[in-house]
Amino acid sequence: MAAAEIDSVEKIAALVPHLLGIPQKKIWVDYDQLADVLYVNFKKPSHADDSDITDDDVIVRYEKGKIVGITFLNASKRQKQIKPL
């Protein structure tokens, strides 16, 4: 395995405890590099009927009052930034 692949596996492995700690058990992630937007979805297909945007450009999407996704605007600028919602 190449060094870059090992680095990717290690970064994803570091997420495992965090992912196991959230109530949603199915997660889809998509990054739009051109728009610099990271989409995290907990339901496919999701049909959000409401959303909130935080002060740091995170959009939390809801369907019937339950979180179905989170959108991170300016995602690449968040690599070293961890803030609570």
Image: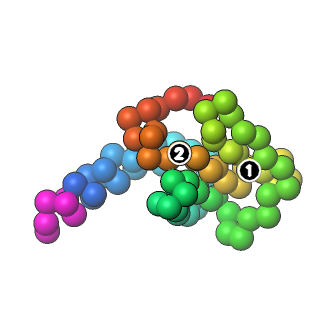
**Labels 2 & 1 near each other (Cβ < 8 A):** no
Q: What segment is highlighted magenta in the picture?
A: 1-6
Residue receiving disc 1: 61
- The percent coordinates of residue 84 (x first, y second) are 56, 29
Q: Main secondary structure of the magenta part?
A: helix
Give the class, few, some or many, for how many residues have Cα within 10 Å of label 2's Cα (few <14, many ≥20): some
Q: Can residue 66 be seen by looking at this rendering?
A: no
Instruction: Give, as a three-letter code, the residue at label 1.
Output: Arg
Which residue is located at x 50 percent, y 61 percent?
34
Q: Nearer the viewer, mark 2 or mark 1?
A: 2
Q: Residue at x 46, y 32 (%)?
A: 82
Q: Name the residue nearer the viewer: 66 or 5.
A: 5
Q: Which residue is mark 2?
A: 74
- Magenta stretch: residue 68 in it? no
Q: What is the x, y in percent for residue 8?
A: 27, 57
Residue 5 is one of the magenta-drawn residues = yes
Residue at 70% across / 45% down in the picture? Answer: 60
49 relative to 84, above or below: below
Looking at the image, which is closer to me, 21 or 57? 57
Identify the secondary structure beneath mark 2: loop
Label 2, label 1: how far apart the Cα atoms are? 17 Å
55 vs 47: above or below: above
Q: Amino acid at mark 2?
A: Asn
| Location of residue 3 (image quadrant) | bottom left
x and y percent of residue 71 in the render? 62, 50
